[in-house]
Amino acid sequence: VFAKIKMLVMKPDTLRAGISASDAARTLGVAPTMAKEHLLSAESKGLLCRDVSPDGFRFYINLFSEIDRDDMCLVKDQGIYASWVQADHTHA
C-alpha cells in the first residue's frame, strides 16, 4: 500500500497539488475512508505530510527528510526535493 501511495504522490501533478483521500481511493481500489487511514499511516511513518484546510485533507510527499541539518540552505540537486522543484518549474 505504501509503495502505491508513494508512486501516486511522486507524479508531477501530485507533487504540486498533493492528493486527497478520494485520489488515493481510486488508485488503491478502496473506500475513501480506508484510503484516508492509509494516508494517515503513511504520514505517521514519515512518508507524507498533510495540509488541513476548509476543503479537507491533502497529503504531500515529505520533503523534510531531505533537509541537511548541518546546512539548512543546501538545495540538493537529486532526490525527492529535486523532483518537486522540477515539477513546480515545469508547471510555471
Image: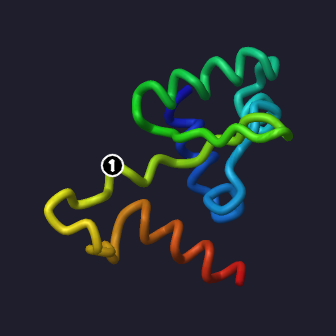
Number of marks in picture? 1
Badge 1 is on which residue?
65
Secondary structure at badge 1 equals helix
Q: Residue at x 73, y 35 (%)?
A: 57
The quadrant where residue 66 appears: bottom left
When the figure is inspected, residue 76 is found, relative to residue 57, above or below; the finding is: below
Above or below — where is 80 with respect to 42? Answer: below
Quarter assignment of residue 70: bottom left
Give the residue displayed 63% in from the left and 46% down from the top: 8
Q: Quadrant of the C terminus?
A: bottom right
Residue reaching furthest left? 70
- Residue 71, given in percent of the width and then of the height, sits at 19, 68
Q: Is residue 10 left or right of residue 90?
A: left
Residue nearest the observer in this picture, 20 or 27: 20
Query: Residue at image x 50%, y 36%?
Result: 3
Instruction: Name the amino acid, label 1.
Output: Ser
Residue drawn at point x = 71 percent, y = 23 percent: 35
* As drawn, 27 above or below 12: above
Image coordinates for residue 6, horizontal then vertical, percent: 53, 42
Residue 79 position, x and y percent, is: 36, 63
| CA neighbours of label 1 inside 10 A, class few (<14), some (14 to 19), many (20+) | few
- Residue at the limit of the structure toward the right, as seen here: 55
Percent position (x, y) of residue 88? 62, 74
Left or right: where 64 falls relative to 51: left
